[in-house]
Image (cartoon, grey):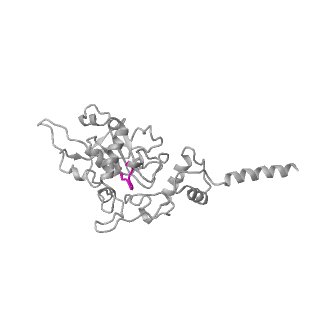
Amino acid sequence: MSHARIEEVSDSDLSDPSEGDIDDFVDSDILRAVAPKAAPQQQQRPPPQQQQAQPNNLFPGTTTPGPGIQQSDVAGYQCLYPIYFDASRTRAEGRRVPAHLAVENPLAREIATACAALRVSPVFEAMKTHPQDWANPGRVRVNIKDPNNPYLKDIKNKHHLYILVAEHLRKNPTGERSAGLRNVRIPGLPGHPKDDEKWPKPAVPKSWKINEYVPAYSSAMTGGGVSENALRDMMREMGGAPGGPGGMGGMADMMNMLGGMGGMGGPGPSGSAGQLEEGGKKDKKKGKK
């Protein structure tokens, strides 16, 4: 079996056309499994500090990065997010596989494992999030149009890839001891549970649509609850989503809106904007009298 090699990525990226507003690459949160290439005898071997990961541990967060990945290396790659396979989501909320293939608590790390098994050279970005799934970080990039990859003949298109990944996720459900939780560690971020400890649950209101198991570095887990930055990011994402509110008047409006839509997606903002507009008209009428 081929060995994986961990590589860095440059600090730039082409946005994914299918997702819209996606963050650029950050070299500190990307890991990639790359099949080794045949090299002539005279070529220098990698330095000792460039460790190689075993296939059963493709994406260890503590492995020393190797040569950098350039923008051209990932141009045209397909993005896969956990929300695509989430049984708690509807099609309108981001799910992209049939309901009978969706799973509970999908993880990006396990998606990367599925793609590695399919030999599609996955690029695992631990800290990237889907705009509609802020609490479950991680995305995977794959190249399904590589003419030099003989394994792609078994994958018809991206939708077929989704089905193959979903089948893997169904055979490897997320649980307390899942590698997708335990084996992903982000250097410099404290709070990762020990091997003999239970996996903590997100410290957020039950009415919010958040999975039972999310990575330890999730905004819903860091610091024992939702951080101020996470709330700000969520409000910005919801405010800029298609068909969503154009702006919110603060925490009260956000909570009213969340209460009516079970966490994410649903009706627009509270009636405060309409009340202000109506009140303004009344004031004008009084002025005319």
Q: Position of residue 261 (x, y in %)?
A: 55, 55
Which residue sits furthest front?
100
Out of 133 and 98, give the one closest to the viewer. 98
Q: Against 9, is 234 above or below?
A: below
Q: Against 128, is 20 above or below?
A: above
Q: Is 98 displayed left or right of 69 in the figure?
A: right
Which residue sits furthest top?
147
Is 103 magenta? The answer is yes
Q: Is 235 displayed left or right of 137 in the figure?
A: right
Is 267 magenta? The answer is no
Residue ID at (38%, 65%): 200
Chain part drawn in magenta: 101-107
User: Looking at the rendering, which quadrant does residue 15 occupy?
Assistant: top left
Residue ID at (86%, 48%): 288
Q: Position of residue 254 (x, y in %)?
A: 58, 57
Q: Is 279 displayed left or right of 183 in the figure?
A: right
Q: Is residue 140 something that shows in the picture?
A: yes
Out of 85 and 38, give the one closest to the viewer. 85
Residue ID at (36%, 63%): 190
Q: Position of residue 192 (x, y in %)?
A: 34, 63
Secondary structure character of the magenta stretch overall? loop
Which residue sits furthest left?
41
Q: Position of residue 119 (x, y in %)?
A: 25, 41
